[in-house]
Amino acid sequence: MLADVPMVFILVGITAYTVLSGADFGAGLWTLAPGGGQAGAAATRDHTRHAIGPVWEANHVWLIFVLTVAWTCYPVAFGSIVSTLGIPLLIVAIGIILRGTAYALRSQFSRDEERGVRLVEYLFALSSVLTPFALATVIGAIATGRVPVGNARGDPITSWLNPVSVLAGVLAVAFSGYLAAVYLAADARRLAERALVHDFRLRALASGVVAGALALAGLLVIRVSAVSLWHGLTSGLGLALVIVSALAGVVTMVLVWFERFGPARASAALAVAAVIAGWAAAQEPQLLPGLTVTAAAAGRSTLIATIVGVAAGAVVLVPSLAVLYSLVLRGRLDTAVGGVGEAAEAAAAAAAAAGEMRPRAAGRRSPRVPLAAAFAVATLVAGTGLLVFADPAWAHGLGAVALIACAVTVFALASGPAGELPGTGHRPANRAAGRICAARRW
Amino acid sequence: MVLSLAGAAGAVTAAPVDQRYLFEARQMQALSLAVHIPLVCFGIAFPALVLFAEWRYLRTGDALYRTLARRWSKIMLALFAVGVVTGTILSFELGLLWPVWIQDFGNVFGLGFTLEGFSFFVEAIFIGIYVYGWDRLKPRLHFASGLPIALAGITGSMFVIAVNAWMNHPTGFRLSGGRAVDAHPWSALFANPFFWSEYVHMYFAGYIVCGFLMAGVYAWAILRGRRGRYERTALGISLSAAAVAAPLQVVVGDWAARDVAQAQPVKLAAMEGLATTTRGAAEHLLGWYNGHAVVYGIEIPRLLALLAFHNPNATVKGLNIVPLADQPPVNVVRFAFQAMVGIGTLLALLGLVYLYLRLRHRRLPTARWFCWAVVLAGPLSVVALISGWITTEVGRQPWIVYEVMRVDEAVTGAHFIPFGYGALWVVYIGLAGAMVWLLRRFSRVPLEGDDAG
């Protein structure tokens, strides 16, 4: 029982990664085909880019979470999987680098620099196809029992290039595009961009049909080439979850048709979650051929430590994620449309003028300076003494704390208002005046 | 059933794997670490500096600080994005290259990475809110949204270094058939006496590298004639951080070295090129270790014994306490160590000069020689950082888990390694080019245009 808990974490992580990061990958996919709609190609690209801006890093971390829980709690299985499936995982890694780089670069281009934008966007789109494809082939390899226990014991090629894996890969790419289209339609609705709503609704419907067809084809392939997985998916809990997934898929299509994008997000996510849970149910209790989840699990104290760690982490994580997504969904982090920056700046200046944030005189020696200097010297002497001449661990800890206190104090003295250059004065609202003043001084 | 499977897994571990690509696997890991570690410094120190600038804005209402914090936050986001992907590569590689290590010891150290994952989460969530929320959140709320980034930067590096410290000083488990059993991850990671000195050492290094690299950019601007209030304020903040950390790092480094002397005598012997156990051992500067002794070096009698054990007559263990096969490549470790100490000393001196001028004469030094020194200090601090990690990582060889598991026992048997190594070089070169282009381009954005974007 205890051995299964981290597996639940892993499945939740995979689901979250698929639902959240999958949509980010899908957004990259749509930048490949931005034209053909009512909105212009440039507007479509901008929309996809802005939609994933504040969230993609957080979404990406789910993958790290899955990896770390897997190697802590099921080390033997993890070692076997990564050594046999090294090639697709390497492709995933490279895809992730390309995507992060392309995203960081893209935000620096302005719209009129066609060539650079094109290059970066192709890179971004390429990585958005490559990464989900390769990741899904890994899942396909595990699901069809092609990863034997041991260091690189499986076939390095056919383990992941086989009908089920390839189909899983293609399905993952199609599904990413579908999720992204649903989310992007919802975002466009929030921004009241009617042309974009129209386009992404059509894209969602089209890609939904493709994804559904691929899913059905996938079942046929599984029936022919992975008999035990087929049995798992067509009986008991596995079958129930497959049905839930299919229903949720159909409901999503209906919701998208009637432009109910908010609920459509939820039901699309449910469809993904049900597929992943169905896969787990179909394979249970086997993790790898001849290795059950219970047998693969690490020792009791490791499992408990991980569960405690994850629970403690969740206490921090859940509210943080709630804050992020509620800000995003309420449009609080939407990219400022021209002028908001200046408006805020002006408001700040006005507030400062009104005395709300009164500028304080700089260049005047605060009476606290000698005190701070004395503190810095005292902590320096104490810290050095404790670290260099004392032996017990607690003394070293105390010494390190003293040194950090010393560092903070000296930093405050060196960079704080007392260190402000006298004569350059304090003219917050008038940078030009500051410049003139500086020119005179230097 | 369970027992037989565990036995089978144990047998798999013991079975010899193809180690043809051990060299490439090592190089691949080293390359990825060398790319990621400087970015970690920015994760540790940059959020604090950005928040400091914003705090000054809130305190004084001076819009210059807001502009500064805002521009820095964009660079912080770009560097974070690159750190996310290079960090992901590392987490892949730990499994891809060293599956047996994870298989046999993941139950002990894995928790560190799980916790690091949460830090990473918090960092990623709030960096999005912070950078995209400049115009949308109230000033104080916006400042508050940056605090978790700074906190998570500290805890994230802490958890990863806890794992490294465990590899250097493994505790908290029992060995059975080559695998860890009875693992106690909490105490193994955090009650490890080796951990704290290593962590504090890296924490100060973060401020030194981040501070000097940033200061180098503004010192360069000043050399090029851009001496505005913006440049001087930015230089003041970043250089103050580095200048404070660099001299204190000497004390922290001494602490770390004594921990090494105690827990890893062979590593210390390699760092110093000490062939045989010696009473009142001498310190050698520069020179070459020829397999028996350091030749052509400057010898300072009894200094090593004094530094390592605070006693000029102490006995320092030499490389001869273990067979040759268990000794690390001495010259690599020794040169890396000397490079770190040498550069660290120069940086500490530069820091003291700056602090003296700043605090005593109450001015920001902008003389040409000083600006040039600061420009050089940035790249040099990265060299010192990497040298430090080479010292600790290569100095641990041939062990992946010190005196428990050898690196060649941990390596993957997969055959794609040379291909992966080549591909990674290409990708990293592209990444480096992209970063340089990005930062150069960013520095050209005019100050006035920035607030709107």
Image (spheres, coloured by chain):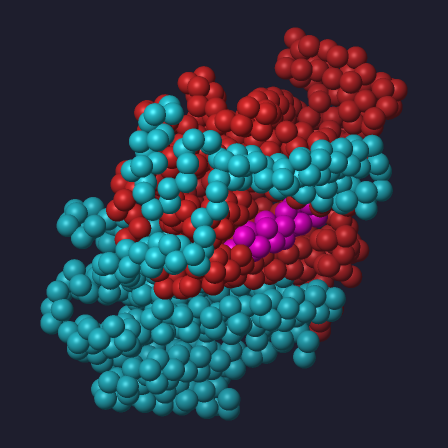
Residue A94 location, x and y as percent?
39, 51
Residue B2 visible? The answer is: yes
Q: Residue at x 84, y 38 (%)?
A: A391
Q: Colour of chain A?
A: cyan
Magenta segment: B149-168
- Farthest top residue in view: B296
Q: Colour of chain B?
A: red
Q: Residue at x 25, y 72 (%)?
A: A191
Q: Quadrant of residue B306?
A: top right
Residue A43 position (above or below residue B257): below
Residue B328 visible? The answer is: no
Dominant SS of magenta comes to: helix
Depth order, front residue of B12/A438: A438
Q: Quadrant of residue A311?
A: bottom right
Is residue A425 found left or right of A284 in the rendered image? left
Is residue A143 found left or right of B401 in the rendered image? left
Residue B257 location, x and y as percent?
73, 32
Depth order, front residue of B275/A283: B275
Residue A302 position (above or below residue B179): below
Residue A158 location, x and y as percent?
41, 61
Q: Is residue B164 magenta?
A: yes
Is residue A281 found left or right of B69 in the rendered image? right
Residue B390 location, x and y as percent?
59, 33
